[in-house]
Image (cartoon, rainbow, N blue to C red):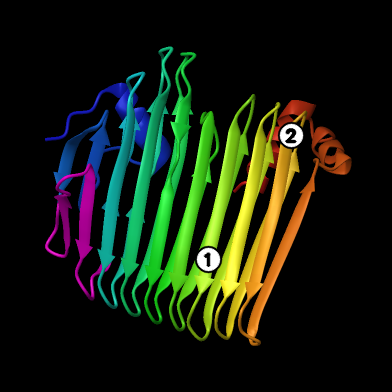
Amino acid sequence: MVKLDEIQKRLLLEIADLHQVPEGAYNIRSDSESVGRQSTANIEIVSKTGVSGLEIRIKPGTKNESVHIPVVLTKSGIKETVYNDFFIGEDADVVIVAGCGIDNCGNQDSQHDGVHRFFVGKNAKVRYVEKHYGSGSGSGKRVLNPVTEVFQEEGSVVEMEMVQIRGVDDTERTTRAELGAGAKLTVRERLMTHDEQRAISVYDVALNGKDASADVVSRSVAKGTSCQKFDAKIAGNAPCHGHTECDSIIMEQGRILAVPGLEANDPDAELFHEAAIGKIAGEQLIKLMTLGLTEAEAEEQIINGFLR
């Protein structure tokens, strides 16, 4: 039976919406150790040999099942790198929930670097949710550097929800994808930084097969003196469709840099990029304040709606 303390429970609620140990397949990692694991008839989770991490194998045709692999750090000074490989069989349709929460109450930096590789079989569908969260009263930083690599076979669909709303001092988020014929990738990133935080998001997508498509959209808010960089590249190597979008709100002395990259290597590759960076419109604040909200409350309502 998995036993969790109150800090672990709170972090799991933030990053994986878990009020208790989930049903189905899961591996819960805390302070560099597995504290609970369960496989199912269709989803097998085993430890890697020679390196820290997991192999998750999902049988072809698996439907309506989920995998939870959250990570929590509750001790100051921990630094780890974990390598997880997912093998999703043909025609499967599954949900994978990952993410990391760090509670650092000490004066040493705590850092989790996760490398996730997805090998998605023909006509399979994956919904992947990755949430990052930081808390704790210590002066040590909360550092998260996720790397996600996706390899999609013909007709596969991957939907990714990448969320970081509060508490992470430094992060470099790198996502690479290679899509075969008819494969589809959708990414929805939601990000907020504050104080002196730094966040870099890099996307590098190769549309290699006919009728492959990618839609990468980031919504972010930079507050305080925090800085963000959104660097998105889509390469169209066949008749395909690609779209990236960065929509950001800048507040106080925050800084945001959007770097679009489109590379067409086929005359029938259709690639588009959109970017918008600005402050909260005054009329939005006035409208909410006439309803009785303070300026701070109105700003919070607008930001919450923007990042929803």
At 21% from the left edge and 55% from the top edge, which residue is drawn? 55
Point out residue 213 in the picture as x, y percentages from the top left corner: 54, 76
Q: Quick check: can you spot residue 47?
A: yes
Q: Quadrant of residue 1?
A: top left
Query: Circle 1 is placed at which residue position?
Result: 205
Helix, strand or loop at mark 1: strand
Q: Which residues are magenta?
A: 39-66
Front residue (pair 119, 2): 119
Q: Quick check: can you spot residue 21?
A: no
Quick check: 72 left or right of 58?
right
Query: Circle 2 is placed at which residue position?
Result: 299
Point out residue 119 in the picture as x, y percentages from the top left corner: 32, 67
Point out residue 252 in the picture as x, y percentages from the top left corner: 77, 29
Front residue (pair 79, 25): 79
Which mark is first along the chain, 2 or 1?
A: 1
Q: Is residue 133 magenta?
A: no
In the rendering, which numbered label is found on residue 41?
none
- As drawn, 213 above or below 16: below
